[in-house]
Amino acid sequence: MNVHDKYKPLTFWEKTYLPGVTASLWLTSKHFFRNMTSHTLRLVGIKLRWPGSVTFQYPEVFRPIFPRLRTKHRLTKREDGSPRCVACMLCETVCPAACIYIIAEEKLAEPQIEKMPKSFDIDLGLCIFCGYCVEACPEDAIRMDTGIVEISNTSRIDMLLNMETMLNLEPNPERYVKFDKEGNVVI
């Protein structure tokens, strides 16, 4: 499209908006009748390759999510139950939303680990779920694989994740879709 075509005056036909309304009604009708035909044939017993649009009854049935989806954060633990994080501050530094807050303290009990987080907080109200914190972590201490996508609260203060909450979260593999050997999604 030429830049100057954007500023040319509309014709009488374009001013009536009938071409736009007709095109949008055609597109909506096409999708409606294609889905209705697919569901009607499936109801009769004829299986089609394309299953049609599917509605998930949300509170009772969760929509399957793919394993690469970045969900709520969690902190991993060592064998002794302590956080794997060594408070290197890389995740806090790389975060573009500046939603990670770490306060470090010295760990005198184990000489091979110099520091550990005294507090590790993430403000989910600010987080953009980019996953940079997961990629930057050299200790694999933070992950976004809990399968929790329902992140809503009634106040801003409830959107803060603290270290104890993140240490108690576990991955939920039942929420993720499975793949067969050919790479097709198994429902």
Image (cartoon, helix red, strand yellow):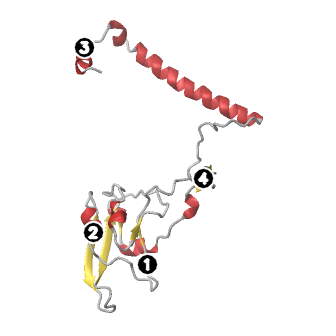
Q: Amino acid at mark 4?
A: Val
Q: Is residue 40 left or right of residue 139?
A: right
User: Which type of secondary structure does the marked residue at label 3 adopt?
Assistant: loop
- Residue marked by disc 1: 77
Q: Is residue 158 visible?
A: no
- Residue marked by disc 3: 8
Q: Amino acid at mark 1?
A: Lys
- Residue marked by disc 4: 61
Give the image quarter of residue 4: top left
Instruction: Tell me the distance, in whole angstroms, between the alpha carbons under discs 3 and 2.
Output: 52 Å
Give the image quarter of residue 90: bottom left
Q: Amino acid at mark 3?
A: Lys
Earlier residue among tags 3 and 1: 3
Earlier residue among tags 3 and 2: 3
Earlier residue among tags 4 and 3: 3
CB atoms at circles 4 and 1 under 8 Å apart?
Answer: no
Residue 147 x %, y %: 50, 60
* Mark 3 surroundings: few (<14), some (14-19) or many (≥20) residues within 10 A: few
- Residue marked by disc 2: 90
Earlier residue among tags 2 and 1: 1
Q: Amino acid at mark 2?
A: Leu
Front: mark 4 or 1 = 1
Front: mark 3 or 2 = 2
